[in-house]
Every structure is written in C-alpha cells, then in structure tokens.
Amino acid sequence: MEIVNNGKAPDQLKTIGYFEALDQSRLCLRMSVKEIPANKYSHIHFAFAAVTSSFDVDISDVEYEFSKFVKMSGFKKILTFGGWAFSTEAGIFQRFRDATKKEHRETFVNNLVSFMNRKNLDGFDFDWEYPGAPDIPDITPGSPEEGDNYLAFLQLLRSKLPSEKSLSLAVPASYWYLKQYPVKDIAKYVDYFIYMTYDLHGQWDVDNKSSMPGCPAGNCLRSHINKTETHDAMVMITKAGVEARQLVIGITSYARSFRMNDASCSGPFCTFAGDKRHSMAYAGPCTTTGGYISNAELNDIIKNPGNYPIVKSYIDKDSDSNILMYGNPGAVDWAAYMDGDLKTNRINWIKGLNFGGTSDWAIDLQNYSNNENGDDDDDDDGTDDETSDEILTCPSDKNPGTLEGLADIADSLDSGCVHLFALDILYSQLLDSLSLFQANSEGYDDKFGWYEKWTKEQIQPRIDSFMKLGDGKGLKYFDCYWAYTDGKEKKDSCLGMPHIWDVNAGWSIRYDLVDKKGFFDALAAETGIDESWVAFGETSDYTCADPGDPRPGTGGLPCRKLFQKKLNYPQKGSDDKIHVGNPKKLIEASIGNVTALRTSLLSSYLSVGLSFYDDGPNDTSATDAVVAYSMPILQLTEAINSMKDIKEIGEDAKEQAKKDLIFKILTIVFMVIPFVGEALGPLIGSAASVARIALLIGEAGNGALTGADIIEDPSSAPFAVLGLIAGVGGGSGKLSKAEALAEASKARGLLKGSDLAKFSQRFRDQDALVQRS
C-alpha cells in the first residue's frame, strides 16, 4: 500500500507538544507549564479543557497552570478540549455529543469564541474520542449522526473564529473509529489534524480476534507505535481524501507495557497476562497506572534498576520500537516505546513523506521536572514566593500539618484559613497514602496467602455448626435416614430424630436435602457460605465403646471402634471453587479514581485559596470542600494503614491474630470498594461476596460484619460522595463543582452515629477532627 496525497510539502513543519496540565496531581513528574522551552516547539497544546453542562468552557481543574500558560511566548498557544477520560467517563461522556447537536451548537460556538476573545490564545484543538463509536465500554453507543454533527460544529466555529486563530482536530488511527469522521469534508475547516498513531495496541486488545494478525486471542506482545502499522494508518487517511501536509503524525513519550506470560518469550507471538480491563503490569511511581508508563520512569529503571533484578533493553527493528523488559523472576514486564534517537528517526521519516509535522504525547512524560514540589520559583508577578507568603491571608507557616494540630489551634485562626489548611492537610495525606501503598505492598503478598488459607479453613467448622446434630439451624431442610450399625434404616425429621449419637453404639445418618433453595439461602445468610463452596459427600469418624467397669487382672482393654458415618452431608468444596479476592488488586484498580479525586481536590484547593482575593473565583464553599473530601481520603488512609498492620502479623499467628489479619484485610476492601466501581467483580467478586467472607469468619456485631454493612448499599455515603466529587461509579454530570461539593457534603452529613460506628475507631477519630474544623 502506498501513501497518496503527499505531493506537496507543508508550508511549515509543525513540532507540536502536548502538555498535561493535570500532571500537577501526580506524586512526581509534576512539570510546570513554565518549564516548557520557548524555542523547541512550534505549538503547545494545553490539555485539557472541558465543557460544562451549559456548553461553556471549563478550565477549573487546570486553572492555575492555564493562568501561566496564556502569559507565555515563543510558540503558538493552543487549548485542547476533551481527551479520553472526558469523552468516555460516566456522567460527562454525553457533553460532546450534546454540544455539537443542532439545538446546542450555536451556544457552544458562541461561548468558545467569547473565551478565545478574552484569552491570549492562538487556537483551539478538539479531542473527542470518538463520535459515533458503538463499543466504548460502560457508556451508551454513539449515534450515526455524531460525525456529521461534529462537521457542522467545526464549520460554524471556523466561520466565527478570527482567521488568524487555528482550529485542529485529533483523529484516531483505527479504521473502525476513523470511519465515523467525514475527514475529507472536515479538512476544509480545520488547519490540521492530530493523527493519533499510537496506542495501536494495548491491554484492551484481549479477546479481540481482529486486533492482531496471527493472534486470535488478542494477547500477543505488540508495540503500540509499530512503524509498519503507522505507515498503513497514514495510507488509510490519505486515501480517505486528506492531504499529507495537513496531517500531524503522533509520536510518544510513554510506553504501553504488559506482564509477560513467559519472560523467555518476547517475540510478537508471545503472550501477556490479564484481561481486557485489567493490566498485570507494574504501575510506575508517577503515572501509577499498570500498562502505561512514562519515558522518564523507564529511563530511571534503566539507570537505577533498584528493586528490579531483571532489566534488559533493546531495539526491535521489525516494529522500529525501543523495548524494555524489567521486573522480578516470574513477574517481568515488556514495554514498547521510543527514546530520543528513535524518535528523531521517526520524525525525519515523517518529514520525508511530506506530512505536516509531529505531535508528542506528552512533553511532561519525557523527564523528571525541576518543579517536583509543585511550586514555581517565580510567580510572574514580580515577587518571589517568600514575599508572596507574607501577604497571604493564611501564611503557610501557621499550618500545623496534621488534623490533630489544626483542631488544637482552630479557634485562634480565621475560619477560611482553617478550611484551607484542612484541604492542604488532606491533600498531603492523600499523596502520603499513595506513597505508603507502594511501600506497604512489599512483603504483603505472603500475608494474603495466609488470609486465603485461613479463610477457607473456616468453612467446614461453620457448616458443622449449622448442621449440629439435634438442633442445628440447617437440619430443618433435610430428612434423615438413620440406622445403628448393621441395623435397618429409619426415616425421621432431622430435628425430631432420636439422639442416636448419645448412645454407646455405631450409627449412620443419610441426609436427604428436601428444600435446596431454603437451605442455601439460610446457609448464606447465617454463615456467608455460598452454594458454590459446598459439596455433598460422606464423613466417617469413630469413638471407642465404653468398656464398662474394669475387671481385676484384665488390664486396659483395646479400643472397640464405634463408627459414626454421615452420608450426603454438606462439606467444603474443593479450593479451586472458592474465590477469595486479593484486596491489593482492589487498591491497584482504584488508582485511576484516586487520581481523579486528587485532581478534583487540587482544583478545589486552588479555588478556595484564590477566593481570598477580590479577583479570584468564588465557586467553591470551603466548608463543603473539607467535609466532602475528608471521607474518601480518610477511607483510603485507613486501607493503607491496614496493609501496614497486616505486615506486622507473623506467620505463627495464634487464632485471634488470624482473625485480626482477616479483619484488617476486609477493612481494606470495605474502605476501597467505593473507589473501584464496576471493576470490583473481576477482582474480588461482588460486594455481597466480600460481605460473605466477613460473615464466615465473624460473629454478629464484630468489626468485619459492621464494615460489610457499609458496602452493601451502593447509594450510601461513601459511594455517593465519591460519585459526586470524582465521578466514580457515574453521576449525573449535570452539577457544577460547587453544587457537587455541596451535595457530597450533605451526603456525609446524613450519616448517623450508628452509621459512623460501622467504621474503624481510627477512621472515626480522624473524622471527628475534620468535623471540628
């Protein structure tokens, strides 16, 4: 296949860099927009702005960095809207769909033009992923008219923007998604396309038989930046009618990584682990997402292997990709990316084909920043930080750094400062929790092995108690056929049969289950044991017959065994039928939503702080923000602290220590489940299945059981709060930030004392400090 429509070179070879303004919410790789070099890029795309429910521009999550960005020079300043998360998350995925409809299009365009006129920008870029897409997970399919709506929107926006302002569009390099875009017509109204020739492969390929030639299971090690596949994508879009010089080709500063099934097999037909929704790959310390890791983190692994005894890098010539294999024996990742030399070669190849240039996702992923503490040396206002601190309403040296310390001095501070300091403390606590998770993960997995073993050990004793001879609660669901050894069977109610077990004789009881549903419903309600955990079979034991009074000279008599048999008796099934999920996987799966929480908190913190100034925003109630954010952050802190407690339990634990360990692990589950949402099932089963384990190992009223109550109601405060402030689990998406915080604060306020009693004492103590502030 040959590239077409590339006879003319572009007037200007564009070198575009995307800047992720939300990088400030990471633990590290926190590049300030001011660190972008002035003469390296022709254009900087500032990502991402959002769209409000009233179809206006929303930069509230990135306002601080944006305020610095618009003052910069040395490159074209472009504001990018959307991105994958904004296009696909529950509650907000409908925004682009609605904003481009005929009835809302004019409003959206007018708001965009007004924003452009107020800000010192050179253009807009739109990244809707993807109009008309039928198969994006967890959202309703797109409609066929969305591509045409997008075209009409761009046409209208182009007609109203000043001619010197640019308009660009990101489009996918996948035929199945690209075909929804009328690209030949769109090309008449945009200055250039960002062609996303990356993420050509990823964890999502699993079970897609069409995603990888020669790999019907979709789980083979393939580079997401494969040069041959990039070439084929360039052929596709130029044949669709777009000139090459109007196409800016994507390059990357990150890898897609996979957990190898066999570390000795690294070719394109070797396979990786995990399902389509869950990568088993290591999460980077900064990007904190399994399967997605930055060049900066990869380079650090190469230079400083640290805890990874296996580190091997090479160039795969077939895909024209850098490959890094790293990890521990039995757990090695394979990551495909492009370093500086390979990136330079790729740029020259693209240039030689007369394409419009390259766009790098993303420049903040290339190297560690000089601004890792998130504080610029200069605020562009003529004063340094020390001088600025002196004129702030709330000097930072007055912040005690802990909720306990803040509660002690709250009466001596302005209430606004109390709230601002509380948000700062909660934000630091959230970052600390993420750091501690990495540390506490070391040495945790063997403890989970004990937890799994001990949990399964509880099943048979609980069944035996439920089926206790004479008065067990499960007996009423059976008829019993009983007999003395060598005697004739007789039928009775299991509750009403003679107490043959009290007689000095051998016996057998055959159980006939007459109410299967009733039995398993009651067993689950009473003990937490699921039907799938039970098998029916024979048990046999014996006692020694009473020898009677001893006779002189006979000595001790040998045991005359009296056998006691139970036939068709409920027993613990095989271990492979009993799934006990690992809560560590739950925390790993929650990282994405924890990041959303962190981003939301940072935005609110800045809004509260800036509201002290006359020209600052006034869209966030400080009280609502503190109350709303405290609950999920304290939940996460409790989960991480429980991991630490678990590590301190020794292998020779006594029975009570075993229960303590199980309770601690269940605490992790209960505190983190609201962060995970629909990923819960594949990881540890449903919330109900987790509650079953609590019931299995506990007694009524214990911490595990009351903790289970927290998660059984998806409308309860922990779920409601996170859904409102971080979009976890899906919300209406119709509320402003202030409204969402107010509703979240109200949800927390509805918790009664009896509800709070279901949380751990450590959580309640911290929560009480927040309420005092």
Image: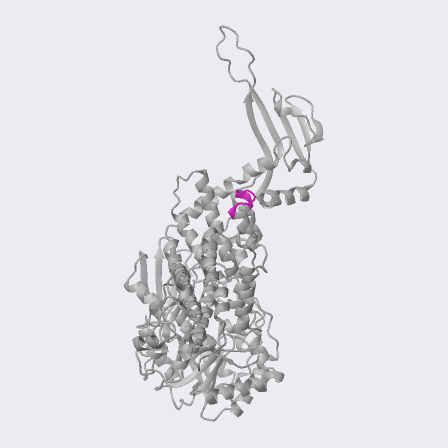
Residue with the most extreme bottom position: 163
Residue with the most extreme left position: 303
Q: Taking 621 as reference, is 653 left or right?
A: left
Find the magenta span and give its range.
695-703
Q: Position of residue 220 (x, y in %)?
A: 45, 62
Report how many numbered discs are placed on residues in the image.
0
Q: Position of residue 31 (x, y in %)?
A: 35, 73
Residue 1 shows in this picture = no
As displayed, is residue 546 above or below residue 188? above
Q: Taking 658 as reference, is 686 left or right?
A: right
**Which of 342/81 is in front?**
81
Which colour scheme appears in the figure?
A: one colour
Residue with the most extreme front position: 412
Q: Taking 101 as reference, is 612 left or right?
A: left
As displayed, is residue 17 above or below residue 8? above
Residue 401 shows in this picture = yes
Q: Position of residue 407 (x, y in %)?
A: 42, 61
Is residue 336 in the magenta section?
A: no
As displayed, is residue 700 above or below residue 637? above
Residue 41: quarter of image: bottom left
Going 43% across and 84% down the picture, which residue do you hit?
Answer: 78
Is residue 698 in the magenta section?
A: yes
Going 47% across and 90% down the picture, which residue do you hit?
Answer: 117
**Which of 668/351 is in front?**
668
Residue 417: quarter of image: bottom left
On-image quarter of the C terminus: bottom left
**Which of 734/741 is in front?**
741
Q: Position of residue 320 (x, y in %)?
A: 37, 71
**Which of 408/496 is in front?**
408
As displayed, is residue 490 above or below residue 267? above
